[in-house]
Amino acid sequence: MSKVFVNVALSLDGYLAPEGMTMENPGYKDWGAKWGALMAWLLNQRYFRENLKFGPGGETGPVNDLVRSTTERIGANIMGKRMFDQGERSWPDDAPFHTPVYVLTNVRREPWARPGGTTFHFINDGPERALGLAREAAGVRDIRIAGGADVIQQYLNLGVIDELEIALSPVLFGGGRRLFEGLREPLPRFRIDKVLDGPAATHLRYVRQ
Amino acid sequence: MSKVFVNVALSLDGYLAPEGMTMENPGYKDWGAKWGALMAWLLNQRYFRENLKFGPGGETGPVNDLVRSTTERIGANIMGKRMFDQGERSWPDDAPFHTPVYVLTNVRREPWARPGGTTFHFINDGPERALGLAREAAGVRDIRIAGGADVIQQYLNLGVIDELEIALSPVLFGGGRRLFEGLREPLPRFRIDKVLDGPAATHLRYVRQ
């Protein structure tokens, strides 16, 4: 059966995004520099550059292989409304998912198909319904809970996350949206599966016990 | 000059200690099991067992070497009042530091010498004064900021932490005392120095940029 997994970049102090990170607020507490430090490990990987059409070049080592295998295993994505709303303004027409994407939202809206294989489906019936649809769509491939933090927390509290993949960068944010918050007992239990020690981030992989 | 370093065990969700962890409150939200999961990597290391007189046996691999070298580099410890108060009730007579220990507190008290080389000094003049005394006492060895979280945060905010060593365990606590909280701009900047990939914890070492 498909695995349900989280794959995120995390600051050393546990944030997915720095405080005040919006395009309307460019200089706030230096969020651009913080975000850049969080993502430094990724931006020069060849597979990532190709996928976002950043042009030729880039690294081709084990981190690049990890980015490729993570991307290629995804048969469906699930995300929250805020992540979609921000992306709708900034993704290229050819949105960078190339799978069905289930958006948890209260907004009713028809499916929105983009060039390149991404279709956004707007789900008004909660996270379990979105996961059921994602499982059907993913086939033998896996389901990525893309974010934001609140959506990941909902699925952790449902006990359905099989794998947690975290690229831990050495940057401190000092504030923002925490990955781990509002978790309820009994807490899910994980064990270490694999660690890839990169120069700009530590790639931690945990699987559910 | 002596380095100032932090060396802590951290839950995957960023806590140094689970919520409600006191001896008076043994069953609260299963804190004993959580603490045990946090410390599982350490409890069977031979050097740790010897130091706490747990009896013979224990592992002797790279994690044991790390515990030994960390302990042997320490020339002075600094800790907060709460950590001292809890330890005063639970450490053996031969307290497990074997160095001068500077306790940040409002309580006035004469130095307290224990068998085995640990002397507690009670400092009423703030973290910078404690650090100055610790530097004098440490000689060529290093200064460990032992905890708790609030004391580590004070020294991070003073910008004097040279190295952060974190044993990251896969357990989720869901609540408790966070290591990273209340940090102020400009935030200290670290880079990855070394990662030791153990089976029960990932040993992350960062140095200040």
Image: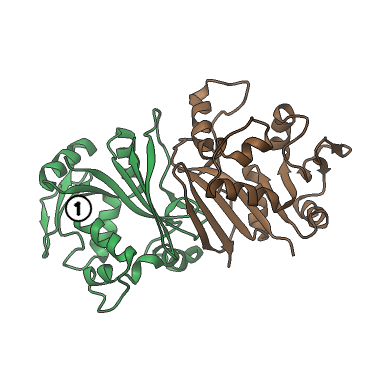
Chain colours: A green, B brown
Q: Residue A158: x, y in percent?
A: 29, 33
Q: Residue at image x 11%, y 65%?
A: A115
Q: Quadrant of the N terminus of chain A?
A: top left
Q: Residue at image x 64%, y 51%?
A: B70
Q: Residue A57: x, y in percent?
A: 28, 78
**Of residues B165 and A128, the one drawn nearer to the viewer in this rendering:** B165
Occupied quadrant, residue A153 = top left
Q: Residue at image x 27%, y 66%?
A: A90
Q: Residue B195: x, y in percent?
A: 49, 56
Residue located farthest toward the bottom when viewing the structure as drawn = A56
Residue B112 appears in the figure: yes
Q: Residue at image x 26%, y 50%?
A: A81
Numbered-mark total: 1
Q: Quadrant of the C terminus of chain A?
A: top left
Occupied quadrant, residue B52 = top right
* Residue density around tag 1, few if under 14, some if 14–19, many if 20 or more, within 10 Å: many
Q: Amino acid at mark 1?
A: Ile
Q: Is residue B83 left or right of residue B20?
A: right
**Of residues B101 and B67, the one drawn nearer to the viewer in this rendering:** B67
Residue B187 appears in the figure: no
Occupied quadrant, residue B208 = bottom right
SS category of the residue bearing label 1: strand
Residue linked to disc 1: A74
Q: Residue B25: x, y in percent?
A: 58, 21
Q: Chain of mark 1?
A: A
